[in-house]
Image: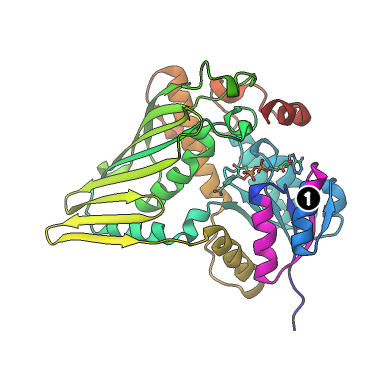
Amino acid sequence: MSTPLTAVVVGAGDMGSRHARHWAAAGARVLAVVDPDLPRAEASAHETGAQAMIDLHEALALRPDVVSVCTPTFLHAPTTIAALDVGAHVLCEKPAALSLADAYAMREAATAAGRELRIGFMRRFDPVLDALLEAGARSGRPLLAQATITAGIRPKRLMHDAHANGGPIIDMCCHLFYVWGLLFDGQPTEVAARGYTFSDGKPEVAHIAHRALDSALITLAYPGGTVGQVQVSWGLPSGVAPVERHTYVGPDGLVTVDWPERVVRFDGQGEHVWTQSGSDPWKGQIDAFHAELTAAAPRRVASIDDGIDALRTSLAVLRSVAEGRPIALADVASGDPPAAVAEGLDGDADAGALLEAGT
Ligand SMILES: NC(=O)c1ccc[n+]([C@@H]2O[C@H](COP(=O)([O-])OP(=O)(O)OC[C@H]3O[C@@H](n4cnc5c(N)ncnc54)[C@H](O)[C@@H]3O)[C@@H](O)[C@H]2O)c1
């Protein structure tokens, strides 16, 4: 029997505990789960037979084959780079980072180390994506696309912090931008957006010094005439349940999506309904990465370049809001975050203070 792959998971919250469980189920040996919140690390470690640790470098000294980075987003770059520097492959949760400078530094570290660096766009492993890609392909081009992604104020306050997880334009829209990159065969050329903070005056987030934009209407122009419009908000009253609905209109049909449960395509022959329940795309993603690393399976897990593409679009949206004009994607370059999120993203933010303030 061959030696099992060894894994370390950094961050033992919702995502980290999933990653640890799925690495173990895939046949990897989870060496350590790291979290400054030791009881959280212990709970996940207990489930997977790993050691619980609070110190990243102690865990990296175990020389794992692969590291899952599941910390808040502002810590993705330093954690990922430290893991690559000890020779580990990395699966970093989405979004890649908050700034292109950080994302490029991550990519450079992976190239220098000769290791894989992937971003957790687990929607690649959700059957709803394949159903949408098929329905979209049958609907002709160009497509006129609309997506509505809404929720009440997020219970995890760091998600509203521009310096921690970046707010929905970075944290949530990256999923949609990744999906649309696949569906529309490329990245947008131009975006135009108006942004709002519907959370103004809501006491749950009043303590956050750098509260992110939480609502926007975004128009994205794709090559070939396809155009997408996104209505996004995390600023609705607490308790309003999350909704994600898409509509695609093309010359050969109409597609509606209730993500991730249902895709319906309407054409001249009638209504074609696809439904699912119970898939676990996070598990599918880790099974696929495990197979890539141990059995040379075809490469399917999203790349750091996919993470950079989605982040560049998010940053273009934020810049469009800040400057009140359309932004060409070609003008959004490395080290060039828009004013709305630029302050404090140079890697010297006080992590402890952010975590304390945001939770
Ligand atoms: N793929 C998805 O669908 C999906 C869903 C939710 C979150 N995410 C992403 O996953 C990441 C984590 O989100 P989450 O929902 O698990 O958050 P969470 O708050 O549940 O967990 C984050 C954990 O990181 C820990 N942490 C903080 N600083 C740390 C450090 N220096 N070292 C190690 N651990 C540290 C926290 O104590 C916490 O336990 C974020 O980047 C988020 O955007 C992805």
Write the residue at 65% across / 32% down. 164
Q: Which of these two is toward me, 239 or 91? A: 239
- Closer to the camera in the image, 189 or 156: 156
Q: Image check: 53 left or right of 284?
A: right
Task: Identify the image quadrant of the C terminus.
Answer: top right
Helix, strand or loop status at disc 1: helix
Colour logic: rainbow
> Which residue is labeled 1 in the image?
41
Residue 115 appears in the picture as rendered: no
Q: What stretch of residues is rendered in magenta?
A: 16-39
Tell me if mark 1 has few (under 14), some (14-19) or many (20+) residues whose alpha carbon lies within 10 angstroms of its own: many
Measuring 83% from the left and 60% from the top, which residue is drawn there? 63
Q: Is residue 23 above or below residue 61?
A: below
Identified by mark 1, the residue type is: Ala
**Is residue 120 highlighted in magenta?**
no
Residue 343 sits above or below residue 12 on the image: above
- Give the percent coordinates (x, y) of residue 262: 34, 55
Q: Say if 285 sits above or below 54 in the image.
A: below
Disc 1 residue lies near ligand 1 with CB under 8 A: yes
Q: Quadrant of residue 326?
A: top left
